[in-house]
Structures are given as structure tokens and as C-alpha cells.
Amino acid sequence: MSHTNFSDLLDCLRSRSQDHSSKRAFTFLVDGELEEIHLSYGELDLQARAIAAQLQSLVSVGARVLLCYPSGLEFISAFFGCLYAGAIAVPVTPPKRSQMQSRLQAIVNDAQPTVVLTTSAILDGLKQSWQSLPESPVVQWIASDRLSPDIAIQWQQPDQNPDLVAFLQYTSGSTGNPKGVMVSHHNLLHNSAYIQTAFELSQSSVSVSWLPNFHDMGLIDSIIQPIYTGFLGVLMSPVAFLQQPMRWLTAISRYRATHCGGPNQGYELCVRKISEDQINRAQIDLSCWQSAYTGAEPIRRTTLEQFASKFQPLGFQSKFFYPCYGMAESTLMISGGSVDAEPAYSAISAPALAQKQVVTVPETDPNAKHFVSVGKAWLDTKIAIVDPDTLTECQPDRIGEIWVSGGSVALGYWQNPEATKATFQAELSDNSAHWLRTGDLGFLQGGELFITGRLKDLLILWGRNHYPQDIELTVQNCHPALRIDAGAAVAIEVDHQEYLVIVQEVERTALRDLDVDEIVSAIRQAISEQHEISVFAIALIKPASIPKTSSGKIQRRACRDQFLASSLDIVGQWTQPQLESNAITMLQTSESMNENTLTEEAIADWIVTRLSQVANLDPDEIDIDEPLSRHGLDSSVLLSLTADLADWLEQKLMPTLFWEYPTIAELAAYLITLK
């Protein structure tokens, strides 16, 4: 059922609250399991009007408002409060500890918000972090949960133009030069209708999502779409899912969810972390799932097949999978298949692929590369495969850049006309219509879109975008033996997943007394602390040996190829041992600690033992007074470690423990106070 009569999302929510004021709009699972809090349409409308009234008393239409919220229902009210006030929402993730993350700092500098909306629980800590910003803008602070609903009566509906910016989605831009996608009210309505049509959603649909609220997929599909179509949205925090993926599947069964999904690695995590014993004991039924969408990163056929096979005893069917494609520059969704269809695959000759040719081969061909269809375009959206050099459409048997046009394509990048023109205003050589250049490579086959790679060097790890130059700068600043502007951050595929590899030149003066272990430790710690990802391998190479273009630019693809071919001029290297156990698998502890024997030393010993298991370290190498980040652990491993620690202690623990108490000694001293 289409809702083209809505003039904007403000009109949509107001209509819902007037017609179904007491109907539940959202449920948030506080603990990821049974503890629920709810939000009705009427309550959401009231809270949004109260926030909007407060904003209208402080700023004018078009002001940028930073939304800095943990997972929960407060973010939803704040986002719609901005829409109700005619302000431009800027969703961001709260910084950890007392530091302002570099990405958040760059967003603040670019968007120049005049108001920060947050919760009373993190307000004071956020203010302290704000003070660490160099030349931080002067802002007004609002803890939205402290506002009285009585002020909602003061709200005045703003004059709305569908072409005005509704929010800025900061995506994939370098932290030194971030790009905020300007998503208009019209874009939101168009993409909402697009998603509703492609997924055949109705008011009887139900979604269960663990996706973060500041990410386009989490915001638009898991929050805006339930309101647009009028169905229940069930939410849990990403932390709850990463700690115990079974929570997601249990909630899908409990609420009879029909429409849920996430990045490929979310399904991969379920396959790897959920044991056969858990499946055998589970009293859940996944047969309600109609569209298990997957996107946001390369979609692996092996992941889909393994997930379908593993969870078939719980009622999951392979036809539930719905591979799709999208990006923030097109609001969210670009293409998708049919709800009742099995995923479509194509086997392409690898040698032909290297020549940008599409040559279909049998699936059993040893040189075949397997690709998953991400469906077709819907509504008025058009997709073209374009030669990026000649700007002409490719022949059907050629691979080219994916270009997109339609009502979901956003307005451009905030205050960045040069990048806007290059990305959003591309023209084919034979006509003047404007297209969005996605930077992704692919081909069309039988009307279905297949993505083969990326034209740009963007890294996608765990569904998050990382610019390689950001990681490279982090590496080169972490140790004096490393040469500036002489490194590459690349991704390689290992066991059907993408992992980070660092190729880095060392200074000539450091060759004689090169301490490889010290440099590797510095690199892993810096990347873990600043980017929250782990490194699979580090190759330290001779000075002036990294592949470059004639103009001096790093050739990252050549670096990757030479790493895989073992043809780099290596002077020192490190590879993550036993990737499986480090990245995902956690050994189980059979019994909890007796409270009477619990000491700081016992807690520290447990953490050392478990850390040695997940990081494949010699326990004697782990210094309890050194930051855990020196071991290069990514956030998913630390969150899982927190969950195991909570089980062992039989104690609820905050998921940010390993960031709040960065050494084992500090953490053990804190934990002993909880007993």
C-alpha cells in the first residue's frame, strides 16, 4: 500500500499519531533479550513536538543539530524532533571514554552544529569530550529526556519544502575531509516508498534490528520504514548482537519478524558463533522470516549457503535471503530482488574478469569467481554500467562503473560543491542527464545487477566504511621508523571475509637496528585504538620499494597483488596466527568463579587466560599494566570478551568496560568492587 499522500515524514508521523495514538511503534530490548521498553505513535509525536519546541526557541530552520545517542528509543524522538523543527539532524556515534574520536571531531568541524541533543546519562561526559576539540564550536546542550512534555504545546509547524535537507549522513569520507550526504525530505519519502515496494511491506510486517541508529541502514530501514509503512519495529543494540548473535534470532522468532537483515558479516557471525548445541536446544521458529536482507559490503555466496544450511532446522529457508545494494548517496536502497525468489548467482571467468569482461563459466570451473545478484531497480530508478574513462555505457559483456539516477539520489555533499559535481552530477557522453557515480564496479545480466568490486580504494570491514589514507596516516604516525606517505592499507579475502593488511616502508636509517616486534605492536595498537579494527597482516618493506604511479601516488591494488604474490621487498613481517580463533571463536569456560574465592588476581588471571586464547598470545607476553589495545583487538572481539567475562562472574557488565578500563589491572580492580 503506497502512501504518496504524505507530504513529508512529519506529516506521516502526525497522521499515525492521530489515527493510532496508542498503537505501539517501537520496542527496544534493553538487555537484548526480555527487558522491554515501548514507544507508541502518540508518545513519539508528543516527545518530538516537545523537542522541536525547545529547538525552535533556540535556533532557526536549517540549523544543524548533532544527535549523539546510545542505542535506545530516545534517538527516535530526537530525530523526529529535528524534522518537526525544520532543523537538519546530524546523527553520530557517542565517543568512547573521555576522548573525542577523530571522525566525530571532523564531522563537528564540517557540519558546525549549533545544538547537541543527547541523553542526561552521557551529557556530562560528552561535554568533557567536547572540550578536547581544538577550536570547538560553541553549542547549546539539550538532554532530551529531561524536557517536559508540556512544552509540546508551544510547537509551531514549520513551512516545509520537500527539497530542503532533512539530515546529513556522514559516510565513508576521510576523517580529514568528511563528506556529509544531504538527504532531503523528498529523498526520504521516495526511498521509503522504494523499500516498501521492493520488500512488499505492509502494516502486518515486523522488523527486528541490531543495526546502529546513526548508520543509514539502521536509521532508514529500521526506524523510518516502520513509521512510514505502519508496522512494529523491534530494536536491540549492536553490542547485544555482537556479544550473543543468538539474541537476534531469538527475537525474530519471539516477535514473528518478517523483515530483518544486516551486512554479510552479521550472518557470518551467526554461522561461526552459534553452536550446534545452541541450535539443538533453541525453542525458536524462523519460518516467519520473509526477507532476510543482506548488503552494505561484498555478499558471499558461501555465507548465504552456510547460514541457510545451519539454521534450516529452525525453519529458515534459503529463499528468505534478499541480497540488495545501496549507499547513503542514494538515501539507502538502490536495487533488490523479488521477495519470493531464491538468491541468483553468476559464475564468471577470473581471467576474463581481470580484463573487465563478463564470461560466464560453469560453477565447477576452477577459475570461476562467484557473484551474488543484488536484484534490479524499482520505481523510477535507473541503473547504467558505464566505462569510467569514456563516460559511455558499456556493452553487456563488459564490467563498468555503476551509475544511478532517480528520486532517491541525494542532493549532494554538504558545503562541498566540487565533490558534489564529481559524484552527483555525472553525465554520459551522449546526454546531459545527471547521474550518481557510485564508485562500484559491476555488470547487468538478465536485468540483474552484480557487483564485482570497487573503483575507489574504500575499505569495507564489518559493514563500516574506512578510507585507507586515514589508516595509513595512523600507521605512519605511530612509530618513528615508518616513512611518511609510503604505506598502503588494503583488504584481502581470507575464508570468505575481508581483512586488513598493512604494507609500509621503513626509514633507511632504521634498517640496521630494526625492531620488528616493537613496530608491529605499535601499528596494531594504534589501529585498534583509533579505528577499532584488527590487522590480519603487516608487511614492512624496504625504502622506495612501494608501488607508485609516475606522479607519486600509492598504487594500493598493486600493493595488494604483490602481498598476495609474496613479491614485496620485505624486511619484516607479521601475520595474525589462527585467524579463526582470533576473529570470532571464543573458548567456553565450564564453570563460574566461587564468590568466596574471587580476588583481583583471580579476575586478572582469567582475563589473561581468555585473552591468550582469542589473540593467540603467550600468557607470559601479556602485561596486565599495559593497554589491551596493544594486542590489536577489534571491537567485536572485545565485546564478546565482555560477554564471556559477565557469564563467568555471573554479573551484568557494561559493554564499554574495556574502553573505560583499558588495562587488565584497572579492570580487575573495578570488577572486584561489584561483588
Image (cartoon, helix red, strand yellow):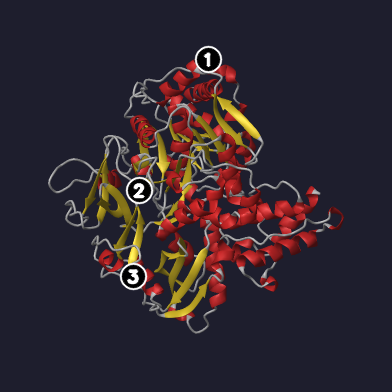
Q: Amino acid at mark 2?
A: Val
Circle 1 is placed at which residue position?
Answer: 153
Query: Quick check: marks 3 and 2 in contact, CB under 8 Å?
Result: no
Q: Residue at x 64, y 43 (%)?
A: 283
Residue 173: x and y in percent read 39, 50
- Disc 1 is placed on an element classified as helix
Of badges 1 and 2, nearer the viewer stands 2
Query: Quick check: marks 1 and 3 in contact, CB under 8 Å?
Result: no
- Disc 2 is placed on an element classified as loop
Mark 1 → mark 2, Cα distance in angstroms? 46 Å
Residue 61: x and y in percent read 40, 26
Circle 2 is placed at which residue position?
Answer: 374
Q: Amino acid at mark 1?
A: Ile
Circle 3 is placed at which residue position?
Answer: 558
Q: Quadrant of residue 83?
A: top left
- Tell which residue pokes out farthest to the bottom in this image: 512
Q: Decide which of 130, 281 is in the foreground and name it.
A: 281
Q: Decide which of 66, 378 is in the foreground and name it.
A: 378
